[in-house]
Amino acid sequence: MTIRGAAFIAGAYEHPDRKIPGKSIAQVHAEVALGALADAGLSVSDVDAYFCAGDAPGFGPISMADYLGLKRLTFADSTETGGSSYIAHVGHAAAAIATGKCRVALITLAGLPRSQPVPRPSASAQAPEAGFEQPFGPTTVSMYALAARRHMHEYGTTSAQLAAIKVAASQHAQHNPNAMLPRAVTVEEVLESPIISDPLHRLDCCVVSDGGGALVVVAPEVAAALPRQAVKVLGHGESPKVSAGGPIDLTYTGAVWSGPRAFEEAGITPANVDYASIYDSFTITVLQTIEDLGFCAKGKGGAFVADGALLAPHGALPFNTDGGGLCNNHPVNRGGMTKVIEAVRQLRGEANRAVQVPDCQIALAHGNGGSLGTRSAAATLILGREDA
Amino acid sequence: MTTQASLPAQSLPAPAPAVNPETREFWDATAQDRLLLRRCRDCDAVIWYPRAICPECASLNTEWFPAAGRGRIYSYTVNHRGEGAYTGLPPFVLAYVELDEGPRLMTNIVGADNAELAVGLPVEVVFHDTGDGAALPRFQPMRD
């Protein structure tokens, strides 16, 4: 059994604001939910499945379904794999639709880390690893920095090569009127920005933004009756990466497993991908992911990106044409949702004109949750045009 | 790359670890300057972080044994932006050290000039008392 062609993304919506004072988190979930349903041509009363992750306030999908008035749910899922959750949710929604559990699935993400900053929740004291990591002061940036350092050691990757990823994202962001950082930057500017945790500079890091997004995944017969162009779900793969008591390896991600599964289900190879949304919490995240997905050989990511491969519309692998988490938006420090939304825009031909990939037929959206420096979860989604 | 020197070892905070019945013996040993590791009696895997189950073969037949306390830096970063107990401190070093016994553990490198930090640098364990019946295993360059 496969989800290929069993479900379609009929609605996608990204909150336009990057700072949202005076609203609650649940309220922003509602705004993006209504935005995606309106995009699809559906209403709250059509929704029979709801998906949310750790950003949703309250008791998982129960609180939000109550708040939103989702009265006829037959399916709920609160898979929490950090920033990759929403990419996994699309796969789970497609599987649920394929097995007849639901027909209209709503996925929401929203949060307000800028307007309502809360202390970063330290790893739960009950987490089995907590005592062996937290006392040493790991931070999100420093754990990715550990991965960057090791990749540099093994493969000769340089800070200038990592900077090329930020430069490409900023080239794209300048065409996005909603981007938080819309100015194009140079490699030198990245390298001259302050060190946060070496070798990562401030401009190697994603933005922190309020906001959110939502998706509506529907059964084929529902999509066929809607006026908007839908996007076909072709394949999905996901894989937590753990070291399971063995020595941690900081040079690769779970994409080495999630990618092949998604490509196989979709019946394509990396060479068939016209556009890729690649999770970009940090520049090193992109570098490792494109290697692990097979867009270039392992260890050759630095040369690949420095050669302009990521630049839209004509690079070898146009990526993150909205500016990504590095420049546009990284709502609630969880980038998976916006990755899917921009892939949908590309397949509908609705990306910003300067970065629209001509005749975009196949798009990939990839997320990574957790930390490259400890343990993480990868999710890969392959999407195609409605007639793919 | 920064040129600032690391903090003197004793000035790093030593937050108390979360301890539970499964890990109590490990932390009790650190208070006596001993580093314990967990080993599987069935498949001989050396397990990090310590736990009752062997994640290689799913055996519950595991035991403690003393580590030599030596290894090499697997990766490191000089973090300029500490959080929690490390907020506002001068840059400090977070690292993974690969022990001679195999595991790679998260730790801090202390007593090193940043200029001498390198992947592969030989290091040895030192214990920093948390004041809570445990000590943090940190590592410093070998000075033989």
Image: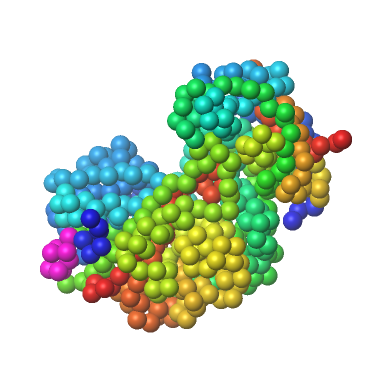
Where does the image place residue A383, in percent across and percent down from the top left?
Answer: 32, 66
Q: Main secondary structure of the magenta part?
A: helix
Where does the image place residue A128, in percent across and percent down from the top left?
Answer: 49, 30
Q: Is residue A31 visible?
A: no
- Compared to residue A258, the image places residue B69 above or below, namely above
Left or right of residue A246, residue A276 in this image:
left
Left or right of residue A208, residue A363 in this image:
left
Residue ID at (56%, 32%): B45
Quadrant holding the N terminus of chain B: bottom right
Where does the image place residue A250, in percent across and percent down from the top left?
Answer: 58, 50
Q: Please, which residue is most extreme toward the right here?
A: B144
Picture quadrant of residue B94: top right
Q: Is A125 in the magenta?
A: no
- Compared to residue A124, the image places residue A51 above or below, namely below
- Compared to residue B31, the image places residue A204 above or below, namely below
Segment tinted magenta in the rendering = A219-226
- Compared to residue A55, the image places residue A271 above or below, namely below
In-front residue for pair A224/A289: A289
